[in-house]
Amino acid sequence: MRDKLNYLFETVHPKDRGPWSHPEVHRATGVAISTLSDLRTGKNANPTLETLQRLARFFGVDPAYFFDTPRSDRIREQLDQVAELRTLAAALEDNDAELILARMSTFSPDSLREMAEILKTLRDSEK
């Protein structure tokens, strides 16, 4: 639980700023700051279902992400790919990068992986 929540804090945030703070997540979700801290440090490894649902909604992931299942692995893979594509899009300095990123959420993990490879190839060819 700790690692999964920390990963969301580290990677799922607006592109023009750093990670969300505990007070910001508290205000948006109603989850107590102390609960957030305990979950992120591993002091609390057994949150309520309601807490998981609120955090999942805030970070834009399926609540299944927090459980050890093949589905949570797929969600993590998609988050990794989106983070990589966001980095690549920023490196491309393309005015349409945000539009491209918004549309990527509709693609399968295989398609996202393929797009990441294409973008890497394009970036490398321009060096």
Image (cartoon, rainbow, N blue to C red):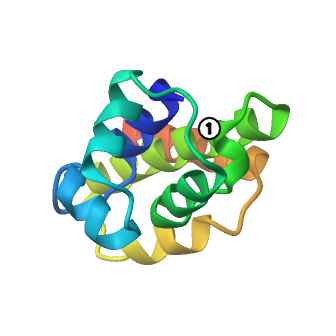
Q: Quadrant location of residue 93?
A: bottom left
Q: Is residue 90 above or below residue 39?
A: below
**Badge 1 density bin: few <14, some 14–19, many ≥20, Cα 10 Å:** some
Asked whether 24 or 45 is in front, the reply is: 45
Image position, residue 8 (x, y; %): 43, 44
* Residue corresponding to mark 1: 76
Q: Looking at the image, which is closer to me, 49 or 72?
A: 49
Residue at 26 percent of width and 50 percent of height = 33
Tell whether 72 sits left or right of 82.
right
Q: Looking at the image, can residue 126 be seen?
A: no
The answer to whether any part of residue 101 appears in the image is yes
39, above or below 61, in the image: above
Q: Amino acid at mark 1?
A: Arg
Which quarter of the rendering shows the N terminus? top right
* Residue drawn at point x = 41 percent, y = 21 percent: 42
Q: Position of residue 91 (x, y in %)?
A: 27, 49
Q: Residue at x 59, y 38 (%)?
A: 117
Q: Is residue 69 above or below residue 27?
A: above
Count the numbered circles shown.
Answer: 1
Q: Quadrant of residue 38?
A: top left
- Residue at 28%, 55% (x, y): give it: 90
Answer with left or right where residue 88 lies relative to residue 64: left
Q: Secondary structure at mark 1?
A: helix
Does 72 sit left or right of 79 as displayed? Answer: right
